[in-house]
Image (cartoon, rainbow, N blue to C red):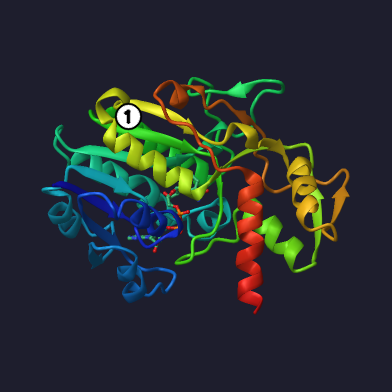
Amino acid sequence: MTKILITGGAGYIGSNLLKSISNNNFDVTVVDNLMFGQNDNILKKISNFKFVKGDVRDKPLMKTLIKNNDYIIPLAGIVGAPLCDKMPKEAQEINSDSIRFICENTSKDQSVIMPVSNSGYGVGEKNKYCDENSPLNPVSLYGKTKVEAENYIMEKENSISFRLATIFGVSEYRMRTDLMVNNFVSIAFQKKKLKLYEPEFRRNFVHLTDVSSAFLYSMKNFEKMKNNIYNLGLDDANMSKLGLCNKIKEYIPEFDFEIVIGEKDPDQRDYFVSNEKLKSKGFEAKVQLDTGIRELINYFEKREI
Ligand SMILES: NC(=O)c1ccc[n+]([C@@H]2O[C@H](COP(=O)([O-])OP(=O)(O)OC[C@H]3O[C@@H](n4cnc5c(N)ncnc54)[C@H](O)[C@@H]3O)[C@@H](O)[C@H]2O)c1
């Protein structure tokens, strides 16, 4: 039976991944320090796996856990630029140093599949799509730690790095409303005003279930995919922030956003991303932004009741 270790498995992506892979014949172990006060008893109902409450910086623990697994999927992290700015020491140790430790302590027969952020593209060129060979130019500590982590992963034989677009969609176990689409829909739903800075800035988005499907696909097609970096985003969701707001307004007509001229967004990311390389290996993100927006509205409606 294929053995998988998922670090940070009690998070937004991890808990969804556990659900997606539950029908496969995998022996899964999750290690997570439950830093958001997640309830591991609820998590255990998602799927059948071993849960270890622990910290990925605990080297003896990690050495024991890494051993005997075929795949390591490191999801534990201090995620997003604002949180990394609040916790810079932890961001460095968890997002970057712990990945180096995993790479140094896996044999060449063990495989690592890791999500990094396409934040590394920072500010892309106008009228050009960033591909995996585009220069990396991270504009935040978060982006920098993820670029370092990817460098460690790529030095290791038998590894895959997914440069993820900003994810959207509902994760019932650990919801994130700080991600751009989730955040804007939440604001629109609560009929709050949104000040939109630098509305022409471009981003790429991807649905949470497509991310889980890509992980599963890469394990099933590891030989043809290994030792590579892939952008993972939805082609139809390469859009500006203004485009996103207009799309949300189709579903919530009273969404009141105000374009602010002449002021900078603290988040300076601005890029479109090409997902062609991953498509050439047979995987394509499919869940549309419209589906995600409807799903999010439904989620917020249920919570209101
Ligand atoms: N969500 C996105 O849009 C996105 C995009 C690109 C990359 N990623 C990457 O995917 C990974 C998971 O992101 P997410 O959205 O699920 O975030 P998340 O915050 O929901 O999950 C992170 C998990 O790691 C755990 N954790 C934190 N520090 C730990 C430590 N020291 N030891 C053990 N566990 C620890 C947390 O408890 C949490 O369950 C991160 O590496 C992130 O950088 C996410």
Q: Looking at the image, which residue is at 70% across and 36% down?
A: 239
**Relative image position of residue 169 (x, y in whole percent):** 56, 54
Q: Relative to the observer, which residue lies in front, 238 or 86?
A: 238
Quadrant location, ligand no. 1: bottom left
Compared to residue 171, the image places residue 215 above or below, namely above
Q: Looking at the image, which residue is at 63% across and 64% down?
A: 298
**Relative image position of residue 186 (x, y in whole percent):** 68, 63
Q: Looking at the image, which residue is at 53% across and 38% down?
A: 286
Q: Inspect this view and state whether residue 180 appears.
A: no
Compared to residue 210, the image places residue 293 above or below, namely below
Three-letter amino acid code of the residue under disc 1: Met
Q: Relative to the observer, which residue lies in front, 134 or 109?
A: 109
Name the element at disc 1: helix
Q: Inspect this view and state whether residue 158 appears.
A: yes
Where, by quadrant of the figure, is residue 124 drawn? top right
Q: To which residue does mark 1 refer?
A: 154
Quarter of the image for the C terminus: give it. bottom right
**Extreme front residue here?**
23
Q: Looking at the image, which residue is at 82% across and 59% down?
A: 255
Q: Residues within 10 Å of mark 1 (few under 14, many from 20)?
A: some
Is residue 176 left or right of 69 when viewed as pictured?
right
**Relative image position of residue 50 (x, y in whole percent):** 21, 63
Where, by quadrant of the figure, is residue 106 drawn? top left
**Relative image position of residue 231 (x, y in whole percent):** 48, 31
